[in-house]
Amino acid sequence: PNEPCFSSISDMDMLQHMDSISEHEFSCHCCYDILVNPTTLTCGHNFCRHCLALWWESSHKNECPECREKWEGFPKINILLRLLLMLGDEELLKAPYSIENQAHRRAVLAELDRVKALGVKPPQNLWEYKAANAGKSLFLLYALKRSPRLTILYLYLFDYSETFLPFLHTCCPAIAHIDQEVESRFLETQWAEFLVKYCLLPYQLIAEFAWDWLAVHYWTSRFIIVNAMLLSVLEGCALWRLWTRARIRTLPHKMWNHLWKMLSQGFAFALLWPFVPQFVCNCLFYWALYFSPIINIDLVVQQLMHPETQAL
């Protein structure tokens, strides 16, 4: 079909009329998220190119998913609309966005940069993340269970923007609509809260992160929250056992051994991962996600009924 550009007005006129464009124009009419590789049909409706391809594959009809008007040939990417999606800080401050909070604008711009770099939307839930990052999801699942402090430190050092910052802002959420003078003071409070939880209750951070995803993963989030609570109890029992047996001085030695063990296991995982069948990885993933809490319930019961028993 004819390329669906705005033929009635020039590109410059369209850029000058950005204030009259609503947020709806920047959303895909299939996934209702920000447009990626925006494709406009002859009827005028906009879709992500990937969403439109999925619609055609499932329906086998050359019809608009919204108004059912037929289209022919191969719809092309709307270059002008793609340019409009490449917004800057000043554009986000103006209508129709009017995002006054500077931290919010930075987050939106970072997300747009990520979309442009990936060419696709970032994962919106656990299963999309697992599909896009199979090895990383398995590593994080086991590492956060075995050593949450070391794993969070690893994310801070090597995966700051993509994983650590969303984790930080979810566990210790920012306050919306604050002045720039208050923002720096709040960041100190946010980091102080995070560091206290990181040192004393790292599993609570994981539980709070899972709690934020209850609306998306109803049962899975509950499994993670319960497992985090059980692991917190097991860690408390282990520290109490060291204290009562007057072996608290051995804690630095145990921490060093634990660090060496985790580093060696991480190195072995990185070496063996390319050779492990996907079926085995899926089994390990779902075992750690859904069956690990059942095992930890038994360990907690043993610790409470028989405190002298050493937790595995």
Image: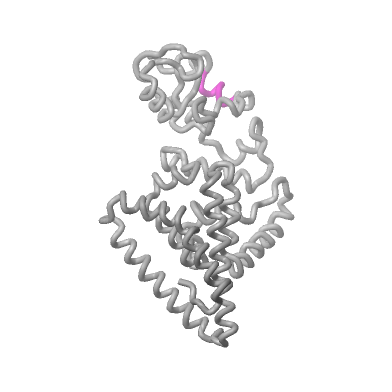
Q: Position of residue 3 (x, y in %)?
A: 41, 17
Q: Nearer the viewer, residue 272 or 173?
A: 272
Q: Nearer the viewer, residue 119 or 206?
A: 206
Q: On the image, which quarter does residue 300 sit in? A: bottom right
Which region of the structure is painted magenta?
10-16
Q: Is residue 62 above or below residue 92?
A: above
Q: Main secondary structure of the magenta part?
A: helix
Q: Residue at x 63, y 23 (%)?
A: 20
Q: Residue at x 59, y 69 (%)?
A: 199
Residue 8 showing in the rendered view: yes
Q: Residue at x 60, y 41 (%)?
A: 89
Left/right placement of residue 18 relative to residue 146 reads right
The quadrant in which the N terminus is found is: top left
Most extreme residue toward the left is: 275
Q: Position of residue 163 (x, y in %)?
A: 50, 53
Q: On the image, which quarter does residue 79 sit in? A: top left
Q: What is the count of numbered marks?
A: 0
Q: Is residue 80 above or below residue 228?
A: above
